[in-house]
Amino acid sequence: MTEFPHVHILDADQFSRQDIEIVLEKTKTIEALSKEDRVWGLLRGKVLASLFFESSTRTRLSFETAMNRLGGRVITTVGFQFSSISKGETLYDTMKMIEAYADIAVIRHPEEGSSRIAAAAISIPVINAGDGIGQHPTQALLDLYTIHKEKGGLDGLKIAFIGDLKFGRTIHSLIKLLRHYNVEIVLISPVDLALPESYRKALQKNKTKFEETEDIKALWDCDVAYITRIQEERFVDRSEYEKLKNSYTINRAFVQASRKQTMIMHPLPRVNELSTDVDDLPNAAYFRMAKYGVHVRMALLCLCLKTEIG
Ligand code: CP
């Protein structure tokens, strides 16, 4: 297989279809080796700096689990208040320190473009774990892995995105990856939370078939429904959030009315857009996604550190 060409993982745009296929293949290998207890030691002696300046449950813990399972070590800082950034230190200087302590860094930060600043500052690999309303490329790779694994491929699928398409960085990244596949996209959101123009233009340029609607029933014709919460923390105007916060709630009866066995995905956390009575339906994939995420991130850590898998 061709070599993985990237040092950093910053933006879904950097991935060609071939790069994505390397990640999918390596994740599959990691998954198989994990079952046989053959992954521990792959990154022995390596240190991951886990830098989370914005809240997270899944991304931080799954990266840290991934590194631990590979036999590496983790150093971590959570929130600005426990970092010298709160005393006025720049992100550039912070990253210069990290270079002295770790072999690879994962960063989540509220400002779009911050992971690029981090990567430009240092020579060790940097992985973007979410930069404001920008990108969340490793989430998109695990989303893609989930669809590929559970649907047997991507070409020919009809995929709906529901909820906050304006601020949802996981959607922004996944849409960028999907341009390499022959998929049809349905964008379901209130007009005020529509997908930003730049992403729509990219879909048009790529000749990806897509439609926009406010009608949630459009998901009944889709193979995959990717649901997201309305991102309260991104709103400047609180009254706008109050107006939009209950735009959609998807429950069990609604999912069961689907004409297809629509796979229900959600990057989580959820608030009230996805009812817990959906959880035990076989097509509810969101908790399985979190599990696949560890294997995807194990593969990414090995690929960025140029470590042979298997
Ligand atoms: N999906 C995701 O990014 O979750 P966290 O914000 O909990 O990391």
Image (spheres, rainbow, N blue to C red):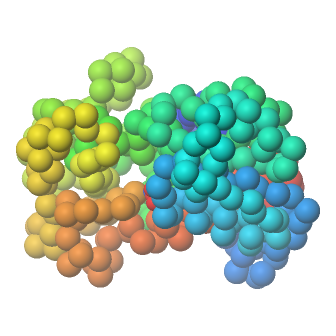
Total marks in image: 0
Does residue 134 appear to the left or right of 240 in the view shown?
right
Name the one closer to the observer, 74 or 170. 74
The N terminus sits in image quarter: top right
In front of the other: 92 or 204: 92
Q: Give the quarter of the image for residue 94.
A: top right
Q: Is residue 161 left or right of residue 156?
A: left
Q: Which residue, as the protein is rendered here, is positioned at the far right?
A: 45
Q: Give the quarter of the figure containing the C terminus.
A: bottom right
The residue shown at (91%, 62%) is: 45
Q: Position of residue 116 (x, y in %)?
A: 63, 29
Residue ID at (67%, 64%): 64
The x, y position of residue 79, in whole percent, is 54, 52
Q: Position of residue 33 (x, y in %)?
A: 75, 73
Q: Residue at x 54, y 28 (%)?
A: 113
Tell me: 276 left or right of 154. Answer: left
Which residue is rendered at x = 36% and y = 61% of the image? Answer: 269
* Left or right of residue 1, residue 25 in this image: left
Residue 135 visible to an observer of this rendering: no
Residue reaching furthest to the front:
87
Picture coordinates of residue 255, whole percent (x, y) = 17, 67
Would you say residue 302 is visible in this rendering?
A: yes
Q: Nearer the viewer, residue 242 or 6?
A: 242
